[in-house]
Image (tube, grey):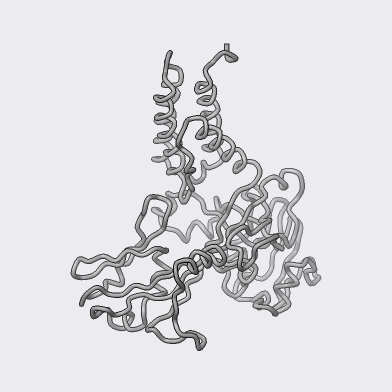
Amino acid sequence: MGFFKPKHIKDGNLLLKGVSKFVRYNRDLISSEKGKNVESIEADFREALERPGVSKEELNEAAVKLTEACEESVPRYKSSMLKENLEVIFVAVVIAMGIRAYFVQPFKIPTGSMQPTLNGIIAHSHRDSSPIDGVEYTEPGRFGQIWEKLYYGRSYVNLVSEGDDTILVSEIKAVKSMVFFTRTAIPCRSGRVYTVAGSAGKIKELITNELRRNPVVKKGQVIARGYIDTGDQVLVDKFSYHWRKPKRGEVFVFVTRGIRGIEDRFSAEERKGGAQHYIKRLGGVPGDHLQVQPPNLLINGEVAKAEGFVKVMSQKDGYNGYTTGYKLDFNLGPEEYIALGDNSANSSDSRVWGTVARDNLIGRAMFVYLPIGHHWGSIR
């Protein structure tokens, strides 16, 4: 009888349910190869769970393998650090997966398409030791950097050559570091490789002007200098759209699955990682007629009235209004939505790749929880 089963067996069954929900929710993100790996390890765990007299320690080891397989199957999935005992693992995984699947999901802004409403990842270069906006480059002490990491999501880079060498700028690339962190490898002709925290694209933006012109460096010469501010990290309300219709003007997250104009931009290798998640402002709902007449957005023949649109059209406080250059006229079908970036002049959005289907909508972006120094609070 289930009532008399040992607690680690009951928790094992809970873990299987959590894994099932995790796989269903992330099916579009899990590659075929990694999906088969999860299935294989899940079968091993199920076999151990059903084995008479299986010990708590043995089941714990199998649970760790299954949990790690799930975490590694999804790009950038953040693993739980609470793996010290079986009960904590099972409870944390089941609760976290349940919340993520049905209620709230964290999301990190990767690009600048929603600026200044939301920040993407931004690199601030102090190349050649020259002043920026009249301010000399200074790097705060350890406690100052900890504070700025929390307040701005800021990481400093101050890489100096350890010897005479040639930087292979074209071969700079991202490397894995303990799964949790993004690091960039900067190789040299001598075989020396410098490794710094941050994405390859942003680290390249910090490479000095001298090295862009001539990659030969002397000992003590600056290779990359400046800092990188992480993108805003937001909480996405996945619950409301099950009970109400999406509203014009709210910031929302959607999956790019089936949007040809987006998928065609990625290589076959990149597409193996599954669909991406984008964040934009919801410009139009089914039945709407949208037009762009810079700096205004017209909905059904009238200038858009929602607060978010008004901010963009104001051309104040960093907003530049809606711009032309792409498709300007939409008539939306019964299951179609329009996604527009607030940074209209620098946003790849529905003007470029078309409408978003109802099934692609994930939820409303409701709150910035990190960093606390720029946009912390409700998203409007």
User: Is 12 located above or below residue 194 in the figure?
Assistant: above
Q: Is residue 293 left or right of residue 264?
A: right
Q: Is residue 72 left or right of residue 111?
A: left
Which residue is found at the position 45% from the left and 86% from the top? 131
Residue 102 in the image: x percent, y percent? 64, 41
Image quarter for residue 379? bottom right
Which residue is found at the position 68% from the left and 54% from the top? 364
Q: Residue furthest bottom?
A: 134
Residue 15 in the image: x percent, y percent? 52, 30
User: Is 51 located above or below residue 146 in the figure?
Assistant: above
User: Is 17 located above or below residue 27 in the figure?
Assistant: above
Image quarter for residue 47? top left
Split into 4 quadrants, where in the image is the N terminus?
top right
Q: Nearer the viewer, residue 279 or 334?
A: 279
User: Is 357 located above or below residue 166 in the figure?
Assistant: above
Which residue is found at the position 46% from the left and 42% from the top? 71
Q: Nearer the viewer, residue 342 or 140?
A: 140
Q: Residue furthest left?
A: 190
Which residue is found at the position 49% from the left and 64% from the top? 146
Q: Is residue 293 left or right of residue 186?
A: right
